[in-house]
Amino acid sequence: MISFDNNFIISLKDKIDIVDVISSYIPTQKKGRDYWACCPFHVEKTPSFQISSEKQIFYCYGCHKGGDVIKFTQDFNKLDFVDAVSELAKKYHIEIPQNVFDKEYTKKKEEREKILEINKEAAKFYFNNLSKKEGYTARKYLYDRKLSDKTISNFGIGVSLDYTSLGKHLLSKGYSEESIIKSKICYKNEKGELIDFFAERICIPIISYNGDFIGFSARLLEKKPSFAKYKNSPDSIVFSKKNVLFGLNMIKKYMPRNERSLILVEGHMDLISLFQNEIVNVVASMGTALTEEQCTLIKRACDLVYVSYDGDSAGQNATLRGLDLLAKTGLEVKVVQLKNNMDPDDYVKEHGKEGYLKLVSEAVPLVQFKLNKVLEEFNPNKSTEMRIKYLKGIKPIIDSLDDIEKNVYLNDLMNQFSLTKNEIDGILNNNSTDIKEKKVDDKKDNKIDLKILLRIEASRKVIFGIIRNEDYINYNLIIPDVFVGKHKEIYENIIKRRINGGKFIDSDLYNFYTNDEEEPDRIIDVYNNKEESRTPFDFYSCLLILLKDKLEEIVKLLNDLSKSTENKESEQKKLIVEHTILRKLIGEVDKTKKEFSSLR
């Protein structure tokens, strides 16, 4: 059993600044006395993760995680308390009293450190082999791949020249045969010799986010039919392929702190080639299908991931398999579409940095990419039968969307195929096997759907304008019912805060979406989008839409009540009051909008 003396824990936390620790993992920004960041433990675009230098604690107003520097290290790195303390002590060169460790833990810790040492020594050995006469073929291969000496050095690329020299070298350095075999860098043959696991291959060390040499990825120098072209380290105490991404150490060192997007490529050479072209926000998936653990690692480093796999069919299939896992982790996912069977390495060599970044800027969102894949298989313009197959093919994609996204895409389909919403709904829900001609009467239904969407967008933009610009709150007589869905509740909270002398802040938004499935990301995303309601003219235009729609609704209700035989005098009075307020507000808002229009 391991236990730390309480005085040691207090001393350790006194010597470590929580801001320094958290800033080494995620981008932070100082605002006032505290630091803020996008929470690494849940999905968000607007920072609600607060770090107090004075109190030495962190707290997220969204997911409500909080604690001290040890708790953060535990949660972020998936460590238990003992390993988190040990990690911090190692990072900040703080000596741990030896009497706290039991024999089993000490043995495991020493074994892990020994294997990391062996891997590092092997990496040096492979790298030094490149400069030898026997390393000419490997050097030529790397130069033919257009890699510079600086890039080769940055990534520690080396070569294994034969089967036995590495084992002999490690033994000469004092490492035991048992430790060398446990490291999985060598294995013993029938003759009792230590055989290099990566013999006669180009070897690239895999380095963890914290700088430990945890394994290798290697490629055959010459084709051998019975040998795999690529080879990764076997799983060991320090290496598990499903938990590893290539390039994490490089993004820690070179990626700007405020960069919150990553490019995900399939192979090591893709990453190395992009890096050489000064594109540094890149990680590689080890050439295998993405795992949940790898997606979690990506989520810690960014909010938006551009998936840039090979342009061939195998690469595209790998892309499809990984997309949903990435999205499930909470990442915004876009797909970079490479053509003519090219991979990122080929493309950046042919088109340069600017050409590749232009391709990245044209990446399509996950949903659109999936829809495009179905369109490639079933062209709906060829025949009615193909049109039905296409619509049925996109059914699972549409079904996975929230209501707002679903309405937007369904309206796009209506325009694309000249279909009514009811007809598309029928096909997607398997209620119809044919496509009927578009009816004139159905156009009215389409307009109603679009009108609702317009109110939703206008509600979002008005709420955004109010939060970002306190002067807009002067229209505090606005009837909350003009807003759609959660926007009404948010608006009421803004007014309540203002009356009580407080201020509604970005992190308050998350209070409205605890265990709520109603479009939280859709609404919250807007608060990090400076294009939304960015001018007073935009704000008042959207506000007019809401006020006029509500006025129309009240007029209709008054007409309905006047036709009713029931006595609803009190309801009529209430509607008349609201009608009067709205007409007055519409006049004021319209006047203000025109004033700003003259200034545009």
Image (cartoon, rainbow, N blue to C red):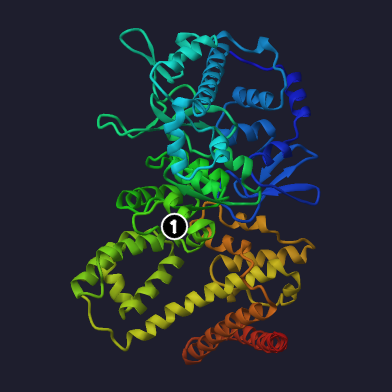
Q: Is residue 204 left or right of residue 436?
A: right
Percent position of residue 94, x then y:
72, 21
- The spot of residue 342 in percent (x, y) is 38, 54
Q: Is residue 464 left or right of residue 381?
A: right
Above or below for 472 versus 68 = below
Q: Is residue 268 visible?
A: yes
In the displayed structure, does residue 562 sit left or right of residue 29?
left
Q: Residue at x 51, y 85 (%)?
A: 557
The quarter of the displayed image where residue 576 is located:
bottom right
Extreme residue toward the front, this view:
133
**Residue sitting at x 71%, y 16%:** 5
Picture quarter containing residue 338?
Answer: bottom left
Which amino acid does the dot numbered 1 rest on?
Answer: Val
| Picture residue at 45% right of the left edge, 78% below the top | 450
Res. 419 in view? no
Residue at point 61%, 55% (across, down): 510
Q: The C terminus is located in which quarter?
A: bottom right
* Vertical relation: 439 (above or below) 383: below
Query: Which quarter of the figure is the N terminus placed in?
Result: top right
Residue 468 image point, x, y percent: 70, 67
Name the residue nearer the viewer: 191 or 571. 191
The residue under label 1 is: 336
Helix, strand or loop under label 1: loop
Classify 10 Å Cα crowding around label 1: few (below 14), some (14-19), many (20 and above).
many
User: In this figure, what is the number of numbered marks?
Assistant: 1
Placement of 378 over or under 71, stated as above or below: below
**In the image shown, does 126 or 382 lie closer to the viewer?**
126
Closer to the camera in the image, 352 or 81 = 352
* Residue 286 locus on image (x, y percent): 42, 38
